[in-house]
Amino acid sequence: MNERDEKGIKNIIKHIVQINHYVSTINSLEEFGDSSLVVDAVIFNLLQIGEIVRNKVSLQIKEENLTIPWRKIYGLRNRLIHDYDNILMDIVYETIIEDLPKLLIDLRDLLK
């Protein structure tokens, strides 16, 4: 893994950890949706993750690690940025609760 890929993956991990911090006191979709500060902070970090996947992680790393849903990550970024007024909070919350923990493990394993 080259230095740029390593830095990109470490930055994705940093954003996931930040999201986890923001939602650490959130216990439900309703609580999540009711906190505009948390929603905005989470969405910002998801956007950053998508940008890093698109621009800072090489095609080689993506092709060598097909279990990581690189295309879906960037696809979520596109949905968030281009259709911001119609974001479905249940999908964002589900992503945080169900998908980010596995992604965090996979990315940390990738750095080993």
Image (tube, rainbow, N blue to C red):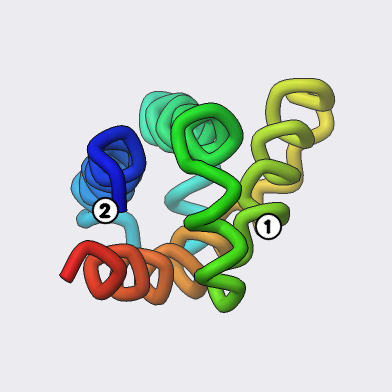
In this rendering, would 98 be left or right of 66? Answer: left
In front: 49, or 56? 56
Numbered circle sitting on residue 109: none
**Picture quadrant where residue 108 is located:** bottom left
In front: 36, or 63? 63
Task: Residue at 51%, 33% (x, y): give it.
Answer: 43
Callout 1: 10 Å neighbours few (<14), some, many (20+)? few
Tell me if residue 112 comes above or below residue 89 in the rendering. Answer: below
Q: Is residue 90 visible?
A: yes
Tell me if residue 39 comes above or below residue 31 in the rendering. Answer: above
In this rendering, would 95 be left or right of 104? Answer: right
Task: Residue at 60%, 73% (x, y): give it.
Answer: 66
Looking at the image, tell me whether mark 2 or mark 1 is earlier in sequence order. 2
Tag 2: amino acid: Asn
Q: Whole-percent x and y of residue 19? A: 32, 45
Task: Residue at 54%, 54% (x, y): give it.
Answer: 60
Task: Residue at 39%, 28% (x, y): give it.
Answer: 41
In front: 25, or 16? 16
Q: Is residue 39 visible?
A: no
In this rendering, would 41 be left or right of 90? Answer: left
Q: Secondary structure at mark 2?
A: helix
Q: Secondary structure at mark 1?
A: helix
Callout 2: 10 Å neighbours few (<14), some, many (20+)? some
How many numbered discs sit on the rendered protein?
2
Would you name the residue on which mark 2 appears? 20
Would you name the residue on which mark 1 appears? 91
